[in-house]
Amino acid sequence: MSAVAQRLALAGLTVALWELGARWLDARAVPPVAPVLEALRATVPTSAFWTALGGTLQSWALGMLIASAAGISLGLMVGASTVATRMTGGLVDFLRTVPAIMLVPLAVLVFGATSEMKVFLIALAATWPILVQSAYGIGHVDAVARASVQVFRLSRRQRVVFLYLPSALPLVATGLRVAATVALLISIGAEIVTSAPGIGHEILLSQANGNPARGFVYVLLSGCLGVLVNQTFAAVERRAIFWHAAQRRRDAA
């Protein structure tokens, strides 16, 4: 059976289990498939749907941009220095395990329930995967390659451009892919908790108005966005580092 057929079979099984679960459970908690499809047909053409989608994606994109710049820059500096790696190891491990959603009260106090609040939380949560992967990639550059650039007396800039970045790129790309999913989760979660504009706010509003089918439309939208983000970053990663040995081994497998 081909991969496409397997995925279609899994999707059909999921829909069947969803319908069975909706019949056994309270329809106010898990609506059946048909009402959700009807709500999907009625919701997608509305301006509220596209406004919510745009609000979530805009915050996600800005947060990822900030996190990428901060995470890669700090990761390069930490990973390139053994002393910096030892000094910051415990602090980074501590900070990256603190859930960003716990900082919602502080963020709301500073920014209010606004898009700026979401961007702050997204950037904070997404920075750590990128920073850790970047530092790890730089710190594990082949020792022979390090010795070679020292023999040729390359400048620090040349070492970064021609050795560190190419060697660490697969791990940096993995960090970006993980961070992109984390950023989307934080964006929607913050919208649910704080009623900031976006997909999460629409889910909360649908529940408050006793319209679970409409809420499930936005839940499905969240899942589809997660799949789209992950697949897009994976495709870009394959094309960007097709020349790297790690990517060739992955493709061969």
Image (cartoon, grey):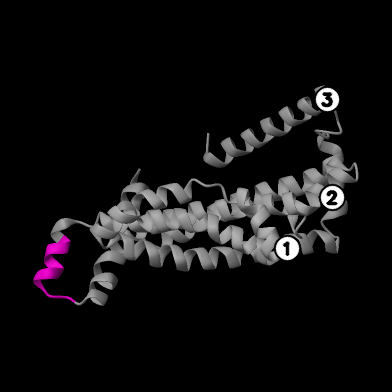
Magenta span includes 148: yes
**Label 3 vs label 2, nearer the camera:** 2
Secondary structure at badge 1 equals loop
Give the label on residue 112, or none.
1
**Residue beneath label 3, please?**
23
Q: Residue 113 lies in magenta, yes or no?
A: no
Instruction: Determine which of the numbered discs, if any, sits on residue 58 in the image.
Output: none
* Residue at the spot of label 2: 205
Q: Give the main secondary structure of the magenta stretch.
A: helix
User: What residue is rendered at 19% in x and 56% in y?
Assistant: 142
Gap between marks 2 and 1 measured at Cα: 19 Å
Residue 23 position, x and y percent, is: 83, 25
Q: Using the numbered discs, state the Cα–Cα distance from disc 3 to disc 1 in whole angstroms.
A: 41 Å
Q: Is residue 35 above or below residue 170?
A: above
Residue 155 seen: yes
Q: Are marks 2 and 1 in contact (CB under 8 Å)?
A: no
Q: Please state the extent of the stretch shown in magenta in the rendering.
A: 145-154
- Tell me which residue sits at (54%, 58%) in the image: 124
Foreground of the two, 95 or 80: 95
